[in-house]
Image: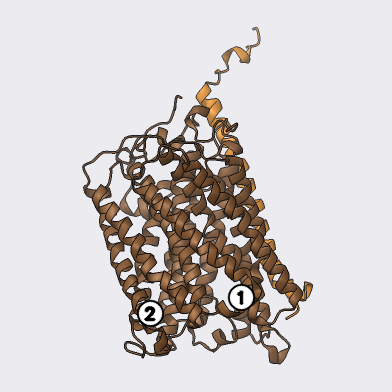
Amino acid sequence: MLPRDERMDEKAKSQTDAAMDAQMRRKAGARRTAWIIAALALAFFIASLVQGHLAHIPH
Amino acid sequence: MSSTAQAVHYEEHHQSFFERWFMSTNHKDIGTLYLSFSFLMLFVGGSFAMLIRAELFEPGMQLMQPYFFNELTSMHGLVMIFGVIMPSFVGLANWMIPMQIGAPDMALPRLNNLSFWILPFAFVLLLSTFFMPGGAPAAGWTMYPPLVLQGGESIAFMIFAIHLMGISSILGSINIIATILNLRAPGLDLLKMPMFCWSWLITSFLVIAVMPVLAGAVTMMLFDRYFGTNFFNAAAGGDPVMYQHVFWFFGHPEVYIMILPAFGIISEIVPTFSRKPLFGYKAMVYAIACIAFLSFIVWSHHMFTVGMPLGAEVFFMYSTMLIAVPTGVKIFNWVTTMWKGSLSFEVPMLWAIAFIVLFSIGGFSGVMMALVPADFQYNQTYFIVAHFHYVLVGGALFSILGAVYYWLPKWSGHMYSNFWSKLHFWSSAISVNVLFFPQHFLGLAGMPRRIPDYNVAFADWNMVSSIGGFWFGVTQLVFLGVVIHTVFFSKAKATSRVWEHAYGLEWTLPSPAPHHSFTVPPVVDDSQLAHGDVSH
């Protein structure tokens, strides 16, 4: 028996499917962005607690 | 332009009341929740203001004990800032940002829901302190130690509430940044984005930077009160002025957090009703970025009288004067947008013009106070109170009201009554000036702020101010009526575009906007965008 050419049987991606795939990739990127920004917020919190030891502001 | 948006109206999307409103992951419903909550808080904080103005109507103590007056002024500030202005802008962001960028929803819908529902819990905590032994916090919304540490058990509740509000804002801002940077429709470049989206993108970075600093300040305060530390206790080697530095490092960017989204709203409304593109779009974007950057280096202008070295005072004086420049660029660009435009004065445009005038008045008093020797006179007087109420009420609140009148037909599908909405505007615009302009005179005459009783020399203008206050407060009931009537009872249908010269992706959706929109990203056509052609 001849091997099946799977490529002939593969369903062609519609424009809508391609758009939805792109959106899923953007959502994954959004989650990555969110974690980065959350880390930044945490850094500012810790910095505010230690600032008194790092920068002496005269009064 | 063709939109492949699927119009899924709510009727086809079956959720119980609890699921829809308590477990929502829909940006429109969460936006409605934020706006409804902030409207309720407007009446709560406003009622505190009515009591304050009632006590200040005449010299002498008529209505309340002095300590309760202090509780009212402190809680009025906390409620208005954290419960009205900030949640309103977040509600507008939730409603409009996904629609303006062609996204189906915010990037993190469940986080969005959490961000909102933290707030009612936080405010129940905060407002419950009125009923505790010792009463509500009474050291001002700025909560300076050592005074605030002398309060009762309310301090723990206040600190916890502040932490929760901060977490809500931070999570919301994470969501906004992730949404704008990742979920814009293909073809919608950053420099084609609506100004409201730009203003919120930059504001979100400010929130991320400074809300954790507030959390740090109140955490140190909590430790001083309950765990025996001495961060702010001078007798043990700490420094109460350090609290002021940390607080205002948050506090000054915070006031820009409360005004930058307003700038974005005005940049949406003015071009629509001038029938001209926004003048200097790129300059407007850069001006917002400049203002955000400069807001980090002006904080000590809130502390000029605390005894800083002269070099520090001069630095902050210059930086504070400098921040007026990009702000002035924006004012001039709005006016230039209107110049030789085909103006029409629908209700949103009235609010936008009032914003420009009233915010500028607040800005003038701000530049006056930037001058250190002058501020030695103005500090802690009613001159300051007049300044920040002009920029927060005449500025931020008026922009929120303008935004609601601008976008309510899109949200509800109905037009509001022209008569009642214009009555609300004119009554508010006149009464707010009767309320706050005389406070400039009181401040210049030497009346201190945060006092429940005053010298009889200040009586006349206080009476005028209180009359303005009652008038302004009652007028907001008209707004309540307009909103309820428009959403539930109005028969006047709104079109998709609503306003003749409105441009942007949100105006390509039907009115009311479907429950789910842009489920498939739209094909962006520059001619449909307000700033599609960046050559102008």
**At 35% across and 47% down in the image, what residue appears?**
B408
For the residues bearing labels 2 and 1, Cβ distance under 8 angstroms: no
Residue B87 appears in the picture as rendered: no
List x then y, in percent, for residue B496: 35, 34
Q: Are marks 2 and 1 on the same chain?
A: yes
**Colour of chain B in the image:** brown
Chain letter of disc 1? B
Residue B371 percent location from the top left of the image: 64, 71
Amino acid on which disc 1 is placed: Ala
Upstream in the sequence, badge 2 or badge 1?
Answer: 1
- Tell me if residue B19 comes above or below residue B10 in the rendering: below
Chain shown in orange: A
Q: What type is the residue that disc 2 sits on?
A: Asn
The count of marks equals 2
- Please state which of residues B161 and B248 is positioned toward the viewer in this rendering: B248
For label 2, the SS is helix
Q: Look at mark 1 in the image and give the residue it sits on.
A: B374
Q: Does residue A20 appear to the left or right of B319 in the view shown?
A: left
